[in-house]
Amino acid sequence: MAMAARGRGGKLPPEVNRILYIKNLPYKITTEEMYDIFGKFGAVRQIRIGNTAETRGTAFVIYEDIFDAKNACEHLSGFNVSNRYLVVLYYQATKAWKRMDTDKAKEKLEEVKERYGIGGDIEREKEKMLGYTPRRT
């Protein structure tokens, strides 16, 4: 499969890479089932299925060849697995790093707030300044 795509001389878009990010997976899908689904499009180097509360229902599939990954992405987007339609995207490292940077910035902000005694909760600040607790309806 990959050799035929290479022979055409088609240029790949810059976002295409060997790593696919899959969303909307059934929570109980096994690695073997993933290899069955994604292995049809070429040699799979690795599959990582999310197992924490934030990553459940997601996975990373890494192909040996970029053309196999492209073919899988094109054919498996919207594929129905256990009454769930897969969302298959190319992994974008820049987006992942931006999120990590945001998390680090939030941690640093909390440290600065704590160091200088600055509160982050506006309602609590109002209560301190006004000396009473407003009625919540």
Image: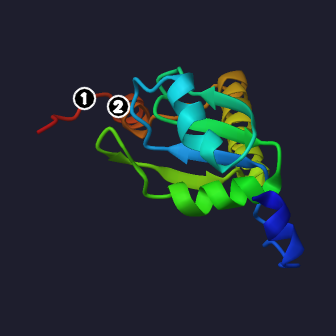
- Camera-side residue of 126 and 108: 108
Regarding residue 123, the answer to whether it shows in the image is yes
**Residue 85 vs residue 63: left or right?**
left
Checking the image for residue 133, the label placed there is 1
Can you give x and y, in whole percent of width and height, for residue 25 in the image?
44, 38
Which image quadrant is residue 60 in?
A: top right
Identify the residue at horizontal 59%, vertical 63% (top origin): 74
Which image quadrant is residue 128 in?
A: top left
- Quadrant of the rendering where the N terminus is positioned: bottom right
Q: Marks 2 and 1, how far apart in space? A: 6 Å
Mark 2, secondary structure of its residue: helix
Regarding residue 14, the answer to whether it shows in the image is no
Can you give x and y, in whole percent of width and height, for residue 40 in the image?
61, 45
Checking the image for residue 98, the label placed there is none
- Camera-side residue of 87 and 114: 87
Please give the residue where the numbered disc 2 appears in the rendered image. Answer: 127
Identify the residue at horizontal 70%, vertical 50% (top origin): 91
| Label 2 close to label 1 by CB (< 8 Å) | yes
Number of residues whose C-alpha sits closer than 10 Å to that of mark 1, classed few (under 14), some (14–19) or many (20 or more) = few
> Compared with residue 34, is residue 78 higher up or lower down, i.e. above or below?
below
Amino acid type for the residue under numbered disc 1: Thr
Mark 1, secondary structure of its residue: loop
Can you give x and y, in whole percent of width and height, for residue 100 in the image?
72, 38
- Quadrant of the rendering where the C terminus is positioned: top left
Can you give x and y, in whole percent of width and height, for residue 69 in the image?
71, 53
Amino acid type for the residue under numbered disc 2: Glu
Identify the residue at horizontal 66%, vertical 60% (top origin): 71
> Compared with residue 50, is residue 19 higher up or lower down, i.e. above or below?
below
